[in-house]
Every structure is written in C-alpha cells, then in structure tokens.
Amino acid sequence: MIPENHPRRQSLLIRERLVELMERGAVVPQGLIAHGRGECFDYLIGEATQGFAERAMRATVARILTSEYPVISVNGNMAALAAKDIVAFAEKVGAKIEVNLFYRSYEREKAVAELLYEAGAKEVLGVGDDASATIPELFSERRRVSPRGILKADTVLLGLEDGDRTEALVRLGKFVIAIDLNPLSRTAQKANITIVDNLTRVFPRMLSLADELSKLNRQELENVWKSFDNRKNLGEALRFISDRLVQLSKDL
Ligand code: ATP
C-alpha cells in the first residue's frame, strides 16, 4: 500500500501498474527500463507540461486534423499508461489505432489490443494476420505493420519508439509525430514533431486542444503546423532543462 500523502505516490502507482501489466503480458521488461529513462527526463522538465510541449501539441493536433489518414501507433507502455485517453483522442480526431510492438508476439499483440478494447476502442489494427505489410530496411518482427494502418497513413503519432523505426517511417514519407520525454533520443531528433512531455499528460491535453482547434478552418490549421519548427523547439526544451538546473543549483 502506498500512503495517500506519499510525495511520489502517482509515480509509484504508475510503476506498480506497469509491473502488473508486465505480468499480464502487455508490457515487456525492456519497457520498464524505457519507463525509468522517461521518469528521469520528466524530473528534469519539472514533471509538468512546459511551453515547448504545449506548442508541439498544438502543431500535432492541427496536423492530425488536416491529415487524410492519421494513425496512432500504440505499444505496451502506451496502452498501460494511457489507453482510455488514447482511445478518446483517436475517436475525437478520427484516427486509426494500431498495435505496433518492438518485441512482437501474437500473445502480446492480443494483450495490448485487449487493453485498448477495454478502454472502449471499436477497432484495433495490427493484430495477428492484420500486420501483414512490412517497413523496408527493418529486420524481423520489428518491421511488421498493418496495410490498413501505418502502411497507408500520411501521419503517424507514436510514443516510446526506437530511433531506427522512426527513421524508417520518415524515409517512407510518413509525417511522424513522437511523444518522447528525452529531447536527445534519436526518435526525438528524427520526428517531424516531437512532444517532449509525459504521455500521461499529453493525451488529456490534446483532447481539449482538439476541441479548441477544430473551430479553425483548414488554412488556419495548416498555418499552425507548418509554422512549427521542430529543431528550434527541441533546442528550447534543452535550454529549459539547462536553465532550470542552473536555477536549482543556485537554490541549494
Ligand atoms: P532512440 O532509439 O530513439 O535513441 P531509446 O533507445 O531510448 O531511444 P526506446 O527505449 O525505445 O528508445 O525509447 C524510450 C523513450 O521513451 C525514451 O527516450 C524515454 O525517455 C521515453 N519515455 C519513457 N516513458 C515515457 C513516457 N511516459 N512519456 C513519454 N516518453 C517516455
């Protein structure tokens, strides 16, 4: 039992959930390591949504609202931490949901899809024979995608993704949006838009941004995402962390 007033209660609850879902087969041990890396960067940004993330989310929602075929790529950690909000967001913006796993097995695909169906998803792509297409240049199970999903998508929103796959998707001509707490990861650097924030905060915030931005016309929406500069924004994230650390060191 974690005491109600424990200062890191939320973070401990999330860890417990990931461990529980690892036992259910949706999360892999490597996912726990990735989560730890994310927690570290979350500390550095103050465990809050900062201006650079807010701007990236606005560009994301604007891009998705003007996309022909947006797809949200979901792995074990994402489903464990945000299934309900991912499903609600996909529904609101008309995006498909695809299970896309680095460590793929039919059992895991089913376990992750199960979490999404429990959260209210009507359709989940990328399970079993549906993941019959391949991304060129990638090896083994890592390259399988759905021909009705990521293969066909013009925009792919993903989280906790590895750099090789992000790069391969960009090379395929996909507009890739990454949620990644580490502004230095290869995924963060290769994506077209990088949201440097915790995915547990990102989906609820994007749900309200979708309400706000859907009042804009197509031209206005295009202006929002086309004027977004990812490299500049990543630079701002790094500067924020650096300034914050300097400030914190002065306060000691
Ligand atoms: P790359 O191959 O892109 O250089 P990597 O080897 O770290 O990076 P992964 O282990 O697949 O790739 O990625 C995990 C990434 O997800 C890490 O950068 C981590 O900071 C980030 N991450 C972990 N948990 C969260 C979370 N809850 N929200 C957002 N990002 C997260």
Image (spheres, rainbow, N blue to C red):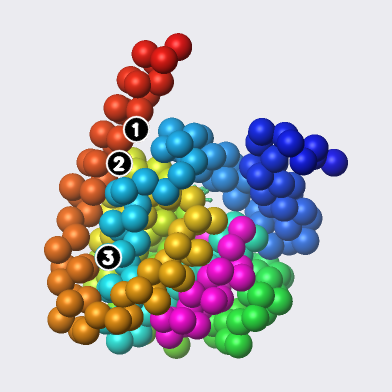
Res 237 label: 2
Q: Position of residue 152 (x, y in %)?
A: 36, 84
Relative depth, front residue between 78 and 243: 243
Query: Looking at the rendering, which quadrant does residue 222 occupy?
Result: bottom left
Res 241 label: 1
Instruction: Tell me what residue is drawn at x 61 percent, y 82 percent.
Output: 121
Q: Judge the density around disc 2: few (<14), some (14-19), many (≥20) Cα neighbours within 10 Å.
A: many
Instruction: Tell me what residue is drawn at x 17 percent, y 56 percent.
Output: 229
Marks 2,1: beta carbons within 8 A:
yes
Q: Is the CB of mark 1 within 8 Å of ligand 1?
A: no
Instruction: Tell me what residue is drawn at x 64 percent, y 42 percent.
Output: 11
| Mark 3: amino acid | Ala
Relative depth, front residue between 61 and 194: 61
| Mark 1: amino acid | Ile
| Mark 2: amino acid | Ala
Res 59 label: 3
User: For numbered disc 3, what is the local secondary structure?
Assistant: helix
Would you say residue 8 is visible in this rendering?
Answer: yes
Q: CA distance from mark 1 to mark 3?
A: 22 Å
Quadrant of the rendering where the N terminus is positioned: top right
Q: Which residues are magenta?
A: 81-103
Q: Quick one: label 1 or label 3, which is nearer the N terminus?
A: 3
86 relative to 189, above or below: below
